[in-house]
Image (spheres, rainbow, N blue to C red):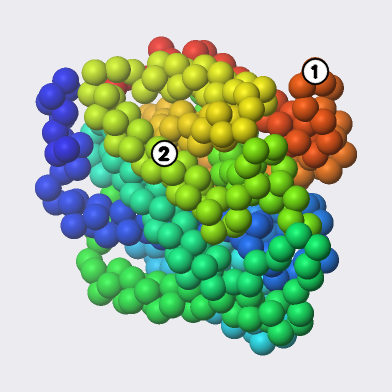
Amino acid sequence: MATSNSTNETVVPKEYKTIFYLLVSCFALWGLVNAMAEVLVKAFESVFPQLGQMGTVMTVTSHYGAYAVLAIPAAMIIKKYSYKAGVLLGLGVFFFGVLGYVPAALFHSYEICLCSIFIYASGCSILETTCNPFVLAMGPQETAVRRLNFAQQFNPVGCLIGLCVAKYAIFANMTQVEKGQTLTEAQLSDNLVWLVTPYVVLAAVVLCLWLVFKAKQIPRISESGSSADEEHSFGVSLKNLLNIPRYYCGVITQFFYVGLQTITWVYVLLYAGKDKTGESYISGLGYSDETAMYFYISSMVCFIVFRFICTALMKKFIPANMMSVFAVIGVLLCLGAVYLPGIQGLLCVVGISATLSLMFPTIYGIALRDLGPDSKLGAAGLVMSILGGAAVPPIFAQCLESGCLTDLVFGLYSGQEAALRSCYFINILCLAIVLAYGLFFRKSHTK
């Protein structure tokens, strides 16, 4: 994967390969906690049963909401100092945020859990603001999107690791609620301990990674051949970015894409499993949390496999065109999730993840292409758009609780099943926005 047959350009120059593969570990790191944040929506039902759908979904709202807070400060730090400073700061904030789960377990506090999530997700925000443009700048602009897609391949690998941790270290050890049963205070406390333990182990891993980056000499990299004295002020960069439709439309599209990805993965467990009273949402399904995790993991495997396939296909096809085709397929699968019965609908839900595989890095690469010295602030704007992961899930949860979209299933289903199925029209709306961006800006992008 070092060179492109179609362009004969180096994807990752030799002098940057060691740094590149170190950065790959950061992509896997935030993928791991992003996946676990989505799983926590279901896990927290076994820890804080008094919470409703809007309450438990606050875990992802707190997680992705943090991305809007530190993205611009991170951009200013790497603009003034270096990409290395951004990586070290991000890992440091992440480390202290994860440790916040310890007092959360001691005091059995949902509020402390949310604070911990917010802090370590702020570290993820700094890392994403730093690592994505860092990777784009590590070689020719002609292969920048392929380089970012290659690095982003390891993000879902981290997600898969996170899901395995959730399944085998969290759900496998938690006491699950059965129909008509309530858990004792001791069982709820034990469940929280099992939820927290993997994060304490993760803190040790992050500390080791921080020490490796601290010791590594990382050269300063200029974007698109720009020199240090060509760096723009914040105001100039912002003005430039707001004059580029490809960029600001990319930020809007990324907002809806991240919201789409979040609700797609959060509600796999709900679609396959049961509510907190032990009732199944979808007739013919109703699996336990541990069994439902197999479908979540299958979704992630689809995502990973198609990320690798799509990265390889980008040697021959324009990424924006590929993204548009996948968006159309995603819409069809969402319709299957709405109307097809039982396991068929669930398989469509799993398949949606395959269509999402290339979207984030492709939108990112198209929006940041040829921004030169404005790319650092541009990256911050795109990372802030991850706020969509905080904004869209509460809309999904509200529609699920109120059943306001159930008329769209035309009476084929009723009750909470109709409410859940009809919410997939929110996914369709998000996919339509991605489709429009891919079609409109496909000529702005090369292989």
Query: Dot 2, crowdedness within 10 Å: few (<14), some or many (≥20)?
Result: many
Residue indicated by mark 1: 410
The relative height of residue 116 versus residue 131 in the rendered view (above or below) is below
For the residue marked with disc 1, what is the amino acid? Phe
Q: Does residue 192 appear anywhere in the picture?
A: yes
Amino acid under disc 2? Phe
Mark closer to the chain start, 2 or 1: 2
- The answer to the question of whether label 2 and label 1 lie on touching residues, with beta carbons closer than 8 A, is no
Q: Position of residue 123 (x, y in %)?
A: 52, 63
Position of the C terminus, as image quadrant, is top left
Number of the label disc, if any, that sits on residue 303: 2
Cα separation, mark 2 vs mark 1, equals 31 Å
Camera sees residue 380: no
Residue 40 % position (x, y): 62, 60
Q: Quarter-wise, where is residue 255 in the image?
A: top right
* Disc assigned to residue 9: none
The secondary element bearing badge 1 is classed as loop
**x, y percentage for residue 105?**
65, 82
Name the residue at 62% across, 24% down: 340
Above or below — where is 371 with respect to 154? Answer: above
* 216 or 81: nearer the viewer: 216
Residue sitting nearer the eye, 21 or 102: 102
Going by the image, does 354 lie left or right of 40?
left
Residue 54 spot, x, y in % from top left:
79, 52
**Residue under the point 41% across and 53% down:** 160
Foreground disc of the pair 2, 1: 1
User: Under tag 2, what secondary structure?
Assistant: helix
Q: Nearer the viewer, residue 106 or 371?
A: 106
